[in-house]
Amino acid sequence: MAAKSAVPAVWPNRPVLLLVLSALLWSLGGVLIKSIEWNPLAIAGSRSLIAVLLLTAMFPGAWCRFSPGIGASAAAYAGTVTSFVLATKLTSAANAIFLQYTAPVYIALLSPILLQERTRGSDWFFVGWALLGVGTFFLDRFSPGGLWGMGFALLSGLFFGSFIISLRSQRESSPESAILYGNLLTVLLGLPFMWPPSHLATNWPWLVALGVFQLTLPYVLYANAIRHVRALDAALITFIEPVLNPLWVTLINHEAPTSWGLLGGALVLSATATRSILLARGN
């Protein structure tokens, strides 16, 4: 009897672990995108082309499943990944990822209407806690420069929130199809800028890393996890991405983290960890 009762306690943590792994892989985006000398739309289209090929091999039947809901999810996905690449190229990685993570605010506002998932008082507390941490992390680096880049980053946050809500609403459907068609749409958006290839000899390793490890694998893991986790919880758990993304950039550029950055990272990680523990316990 003891062995049977111990098994179910492990499984509630599995979606949380998948979300954490997704965030870890996503966090490589800043370093990889900034390592590629190419038009941002060409980068977005090329990494999505790799994702299309890989997803087709992994889920060949995903092409056969399409619906208006999957189309909406695909459009939100394409908007997310394209605007994020543009933002990362046009402004700092810190600014881009911070503004993308306004997504939980949109989710908290829209989930009760579109998903009938009640936004509790504690949810708003953790949203505020995490956003305060992200804001503190970049307090001494945030500037009004790169206006276009920050605009695209804000747009990426809106698209990301819409994608999570859309994916969550179709948790019994085929999220893999939404991701596959979303990447196809991104390829079509980037296609006019992908030829001729620029600095291909030096760019291709970074493009492959982007397409396989920073795009395809984390979104497949995320699509599996979102079936079992509320949309707002999923967004909160992946808040470790905006801490790690600029951290990798800092390490590669040999820049020491500031005291504001250390404080912001501590706030974000503590909010994420606390909410994840409560989620695993069913609270």
Image: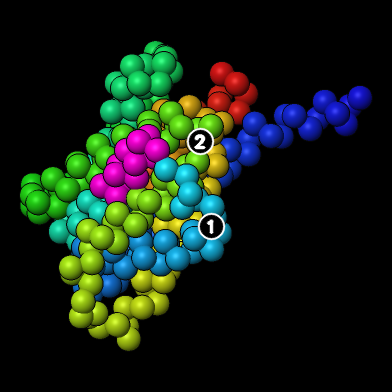
The verdict on residue 159 being magenta is no
| Label 1 secondary element | helix
Q: Which residue is drawn at 54% across and 39% down?
A: 225
Q: Position of residue 260 (x, y in %)?
A: 28, 44
Q: Which residue is drawn at 9% across and 51% down?
A: 148
Q: Quadrant of the C terminus?
A: top right
Q: Which of 27 and 169 is in front in this view?
A: 169
Where residue 271 sits, quadrant-wise, is top left
Q: Position of residue 198 (x, y in %)?
A: 22, 80
Q: Identify the magenta region.
A: 67-80
Q: Relative to 90, does residue 238 appear above or below in the rendering?
A: above
Q: Where is residue 176 in the image (x, y as percent from the top left)?
A: 48, 47
Disc number placed over residue 60 in the picture, else none:
1
The single residue placed furthest to the right in the displayed view is: 1
Q: Relative to 28, does residue 119 appear above or below in the rendering?
A: above
Q: Which residue is drawn at 27% across and 40% down?
A: 159
Disc number placed over residue 166 in the picture, else none:
none
Q: In which quarter of the image is the N terminus?
A: top right
Q: Relative to 215, does residue 191 appear above or below in the rendering?
A: below
- Answer left or right for 260 relative to 216: left
Q: Residue at x 28, y 28 (%)?
A: 106
Q: How crowded is mark 1: few (under 14 residues within 10 Å), some or many (20 or more)?
A: few
Q: Which three-letter amino acid code belongs to the residue tagged 2?
A: Ser
- Answer left or right for 275 relative to 252: right
Residue topped by disc 2: 173
The verdict on residue 68 being magenta is yes
